[in-house]
Amino acid sequence: MSAQRSIIIGGGAFAGLALAQALRQGLGGDIPIIVADPALASRPSRDPRATAIVAACRRLFEALEVWDQVAAQAQPILDMVVTDSRLRDATRPVFLTFAGDVEPGEPFAHMVENRHLIDALVKRAEAEGVDLLLVAADGARSKLRERAGIATHGWEYDQSGIVVTVGHERDHQGRAEEHFLPAGPFAILPLKGNRSSLVWTESRKEASRIVALSDDEFHGELEQRFGLHLGEIKALDKPRAFPLGYFVARSFIGERLALVGDAAHVIHPIAGQGLNMGLKDVAALAEVIVDAARLGMDLGQADVLDRYQRWRRFDTMAMGLATNSLNLLFSNESTLLRAVRDIGLGLVDRAPPLKSIFIRQAAGLAGEVPRLLKGEAL
Ligand SMILES: Cc1cc2nc3c(=O)[nH]c(=O)nc-3n(C[C@H](O)[C@H](O)[C@H](O)COP(=O)(O)OP(=O)(O)OC[C@H]3O[C@@H](n4cnc5c(N)ncnc54)[C@H](O)[C@@H]3O)c2cc1C
């Protein structure tokens, strides 16, 4: 009976590979799990980005036995400062600071370079005997969703996120910085060593101009925003611009199909939550499928998939709304809005209980948390 069932995952990046590993652990070896992705032919990964992995998702990677392989390259975020100013302002007043751990000794997030994480997930999947198919029938990611006739709701922002790794003279001490500038957030996220990963938001036109500048001209633009608080700085790789958008699939499920990760939703990186939301999908879907398998149910039947959709869609809509509002509130030059947001940030900064609610929310530990995100095996 079980030999006739198989689970096919289209897309073998973070969400697809983490789901394959979670299902392999929870279901054992009986049900074939196949991950199909043309990109698996070009490993090791060359993704230049880095991701803030929040505490709950680090617990998931620990439960999936992947964290050990990336821990040495993961930089804990030990504190965070938030500023709000115009580009040419001489000083950037700090309006909000976060420090500390979600649990004793457990930082609320770690910065991990995407290529390390993907390569660790691929190795783990290979070791667990998950079938990795090098060629998929489809080219574009959206094709699977399109084929299932699932529409999306959302829009493109007139913004791109410029991503570049910066080397600096002084130690960042594990501090993450988010500077709200008129074009949008400029985030400095600590990596291992004297390096930081930048997510620098500009209008799409300005971002295209900036990434096409000569090295010297680029350095001038970078220094104006980054400042010299960490000593001399230097771009360590070629800057790349990622167009930013927002969408949520109108349904997370179809006929014997479930959408996870960016196939189900894309949000603004202003709060560094895109992949973390995708990993929450992974943990919820794996739990729903493994529970159904233990009850001897058909894994693709509507009420099994429905449980997944009920669990994840509302949470996703709420996060989408929050990131859209943050972006609207912060990515502009209005003096009135600046005054309003700075009062708001100041109030949060002076209210430790409110801060700890925010930290637990951002760390993925609020609400109905799937077992894997608590670090428990399925
Ligand atoms: C500038 C920037 C900064 C970010 N920073 C953060 C952060 O700090 N924290 C955070 O949580 N998130 C962040 N994100 C979001 C995060 O990068 C994404 O949410 C994450 O990459 C999504 O992972 P995924 O596995 O769902 O999809 P993807 O990484 O897009 O992978 C999809 C995979 O599917 C494959 N594929 C496509 N079409 C098909 C097909 N038809 N058949 C088979 N395979 C196919 C592709 O080859 C690819 O390997 C950021 C995003 C941007 C743009």
Image: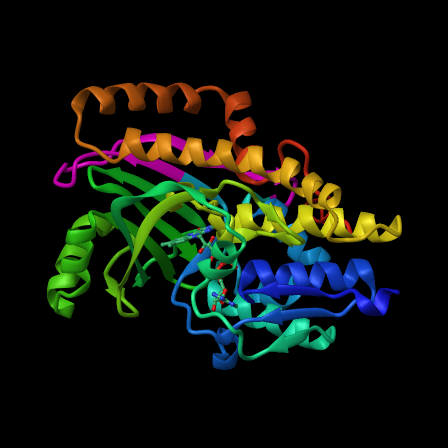
Depicted 150 relative to depicted 35: above or below? above
Judged left or right of residue 13, residue 198 is left
Q: Residue at x 47, y 48 (%)?
A: 274
Residue lying at 41% horizontally and 43% vertically, measured from the top left:
247
Residue 295 to residue 62: above or below? above
Lateral position of residue 344 relative to residue 66, left or right? left
The quarter holding residue 343 reads top left
Name the quadrant of the N terminus: bottom right
- The front one of 14 and 147 is 147
Q: Nearest the camera: 224 or 247? A: 247
**Does the segment drawn in magenta span residue 235?**
no
Q: Quadrant of residue 246?
A: top left
In front here: 270 or 342?
A: 270
Residue 208 image position (x, y, % from top left):
18, 59
Q: How many marks?
A: 0
Residue at point 48%, 74% (across, down): 39
Q: How is the image coloured?
A: rainbow
- Across and down, in percent, residue 51 comes to 46, 55
**233 horizontally vs 368: left or right:** left
Q: Residue at x 58, y 65 (%)?
A: 70
Can residue 76 be seen from the camera position used here? no
- Left/right of residue 104 with respect to residue 219 in the rendered view: right
Image height of 345 relative to 109, above or below: above
| Residue 64 seen in this snapshot | yes
Question: Could you say which quadrant of the image residue 329 lies in?
Answer: top left
- Expressed as whole percent of the image width and height from the top left, the position of residue 275 reads 51, 51
Residue numbers of the magenta segment: 81-106
